[in-house]
Image (tube, coloured by chain):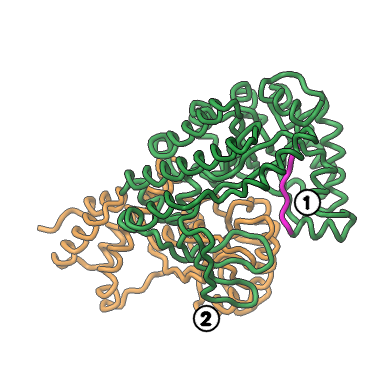
């Protein structure tokens, strides 16, 4: 069975030879593993895992593509005005989320005068020749191919910042709706360009971290009002093109699972265990309508204790596989506290417990 | 006739910035002591917010607009509090640990602590253990709060707690929190308190200073 067949059958809740697999790693993790025996890079780890997925492109429309002005720097970080017009402090030579210092788009007026027109006028920033090449190679290898990018909630945070976006959900809801709509419009337009170039992907894998360890950032009602319509629009576009819709969000998302299903999301990833998400609870209640991709707790992995990790994999795989709609992924990204030996054990355990 | 303090409490809890500022000014103009306005008007409003947040009755946007309202009122009151020689009873030093640039969780908790009447010294993000130590010696806080969002920066949290514990010049309780942090980890590294969210952070901090 090819990866493509396997993943498609997972979406249809049909029998597979084994569960589909994919994972994410911090760059520091790969660096550690290279010292401990991994021969090449992340792609080598994914090959050994037996990943079934292949990304083709990344879509995150920016108003000023290519803009990057270094305003300040020290030994570890640099402060940059980026192509979203914001000022952020970024790590030099290591991974990690930047500190957002300021945002050029700080009011509805700035949005309508400068940022909205700039976003709509910006050219497609997807590297289409690269996506076409990846698509052809992935098809030869039998991988499940997907287009990736971010959705409106994540776009809001990058463009206007957490505090402004969250306060404006109450104080300026029309502004928020407009940003989300414009962002969604552009992403789908770019994806259309890719299809026109001859790429026939299997799905979308769209990122939008709209929850944290306690709950969703905004209430389910606010999500339903302001962001959900864009998720529904993405799902409709995907389904109209015979694609599946994988939605990525960290955090405790349990309060909106039904809304995600109603929007048309086909699969949830990575289902963050440390935020209290547990497929042993949700697979029996939602697994027939929402495929589950991930949930293997990286904190358990960091114990480097086979007994602990085996229990995590065995029990969660059993819950997920009972629905035929489950794929392996860590519940976020594998951190560098996990040794290469441990990860090789994890691959063995995924082999052992992930067979149908 | 001054407006009832209950009205101010309700305005803060509803995040009504203009109403909160207006009512605060009216209470000041009526001759009410600024400390009473804070303690009996504003702080109860933020306490309502903290409780509702903890119970998922409200979410981050509602908490943020309430904190903004509180901040606006405190700006009006601050000169009067200084003039009256009123200082917050407790001081908290807060920051995101070394290697981590996330700040929303730390900022939310800082806002809630300010709302509860604590003086908050915010060290920012990517704070080295030595910087925490210096700040703890300088400000003599009752609490040092450490935030981490990445699993990769949890060791820095451990290192900071160790350094603070080793110093005989620091007598503060240590609170930790953030997405990957669990009560077990907090206990393991020797922290005194763990808060799962910004709402319970106030409760935990109040418990620690009362102990």
Camera-nearest residue between B120 and A158: A158
Residue B142 at least partly seen: no
Residue A52 at least partly seen: yes
Q: What is the secondary structure assignment of the residue under circle 1?
A: helix
How would you rate the neighbour count of disc 2 (Cα within 10 Å): few for under 14, some for 14-19, many for 20 or more? few
Chain B drawn colour: orange
In the image, residue B91 lies at what x, y percent? Answer: 46, 70
Number of numbered discs present? Answer: 2
Q: Residue at coordinates 74% horizontally, 40% vertically from top-left?
A: A22
Left-right relation of A24 to B80: right
Magenta span of residues? A21-27
The extreme left residue here reads: B1
Picture quadrant where residue A296 is located? top right
Which dot marks residue B141? none
B139 up-or-down from B187: above or below: below
The extreme top residue here reads: A14
In the image, residue A152 lies at what x, y percent? Answer: 47, 44
Left-right relation of B134 to B39: right
Label 1 resides on the chain identified as A
In the image, residue A333 lies at what x, y percent? Answer: 69, 49
Eye-nearest disc, 2 or 1: 1
The extreme front residue here reads: A197
Q: CA distance from mark 2 to mark 1?
A: 45 Å
Decide: marks 2, 1 in contact (CB < 8 A)? no
Left-right relation of A282 to B90: right
Q: Is residue A25 magenta?
A: yes
Q: Which residue is mark 2?
A: B138
Q: Main secondary structure of the magenta part?
A: loop
Q: Which residue is mark 1?
A: A42
Q: Is residue A77 magenta?
A: no
Chain A drawn colour: green
Q: Residue at coordinates 51% horizontally, 43% vertically from top-left?
A: A187
């Amino acid at each position: 069975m090819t990866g493509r067949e396997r993943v498609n059958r997972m979406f249809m809740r049909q029998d597979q030879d084994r569960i589909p697999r994919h994972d994410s790693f911090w760059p520091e993790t790969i660096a550690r593993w290279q010292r401990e025996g991994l021969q090449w890079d992340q792609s080598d780890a994914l090959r050994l895992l037996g990943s079934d997925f292949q990304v083709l492109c990344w879509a995150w429309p920016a108003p000023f593509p290519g803009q990057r002005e270094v305003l300040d720097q020290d030994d570890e970080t640099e402060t940059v005005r980026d192509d979203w017009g914001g000022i952020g402090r970024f790590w030099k030579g290591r991974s990690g989320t930047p500190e957002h210092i300021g945002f050029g788009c700080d009011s509805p007026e700035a949005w309508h005068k400068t940022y909205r027109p700039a976003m709509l006028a910006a050219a497609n920033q997807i590297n289409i020749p690269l996506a076409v090449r990846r698509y052809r190679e992935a098809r030869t290898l039998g991988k499940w191919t997907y287009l990736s990018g971010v959705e409106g909630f994540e776009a809001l945070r990058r463009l206007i910042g957490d505090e402004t976006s969250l306060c404006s959900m109450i104080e300026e809801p029309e502004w928020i709706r407009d940003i989300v709509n414009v962002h969604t419009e552009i992403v789908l337009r770019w994806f259309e360009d890719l299809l026109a170039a001859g790429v026939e992907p299997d799905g979308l894998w769209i990122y939008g971290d709209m929850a944290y360890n306690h709950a969703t950032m905004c209430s389910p009602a606010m999500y339903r009002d302001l962001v959900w319509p864009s998720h529904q629009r993405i799902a409709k576009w995907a389904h109209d093109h015979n694609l599946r819709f994988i939605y990525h969000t960290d955090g405790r998302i349990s309060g909106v699972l039904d809304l995600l299903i109603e929007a048309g999301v086909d699969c949830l990833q990575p289902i963050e265990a440390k935020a209290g998400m547990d497929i042993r609870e949700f697979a029996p209640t939602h697994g027939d309508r929402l495929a589950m991709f991930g949930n293997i707790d990286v904190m358990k992995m960091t114990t480097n204790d086979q007994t602990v990790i085996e229990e995590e994999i065995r029990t969660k795989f059993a819950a997920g596989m009972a629905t035929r709609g489950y794929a392996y992924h860590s519940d976020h990204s594998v951190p560098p506290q996990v040794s290469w030996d441990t990860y090789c054990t994890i691959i063995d355990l995924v082999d052992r417990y992930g067979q149908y | 006739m001054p407006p009832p303090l209950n009205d101010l409490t309700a305005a803060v809890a509803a995040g009504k910035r203009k109403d909160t500022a207006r009512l605060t000014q009216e209470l000041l103009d009526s001759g009410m002591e600024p400390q009473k306005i804070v303690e009996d008007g504003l702080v109860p409003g933020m306490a309502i917010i903290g409780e509702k947040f903890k119970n998922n009755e409200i979410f981050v946007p509602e908490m943020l607009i309430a904190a903004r309202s509180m901040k606006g009122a405190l700006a009006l009151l601050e000169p009067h509090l200084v003039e009256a020689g009123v200082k917050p009873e407790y001081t908290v030093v807060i920051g995101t640990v070394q290697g981590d640039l996330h700040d929303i969780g730390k900022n939310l908790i800082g806002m809630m602590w300010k709302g509860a009447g604590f003086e908050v010294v915010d060290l920012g993000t990517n704070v080295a253990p030595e910087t925490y130590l210096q700040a703890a010696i300088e400000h003599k806080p009752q609490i040092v709060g450490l935030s981490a969002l990445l699993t990769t920066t949890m060791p820095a949290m451990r290192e900071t707690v160790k350094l603070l514990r080793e110093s005989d010049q620091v007598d503060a309780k240590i609170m930790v929190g953030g997405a990957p942090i669990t009560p077990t980890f907090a206990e393991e590294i020797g922290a005194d308190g763990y808060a799962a969210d910004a709402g319970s952070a106030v409760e935990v901090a109040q418990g620690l200073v009362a102990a």
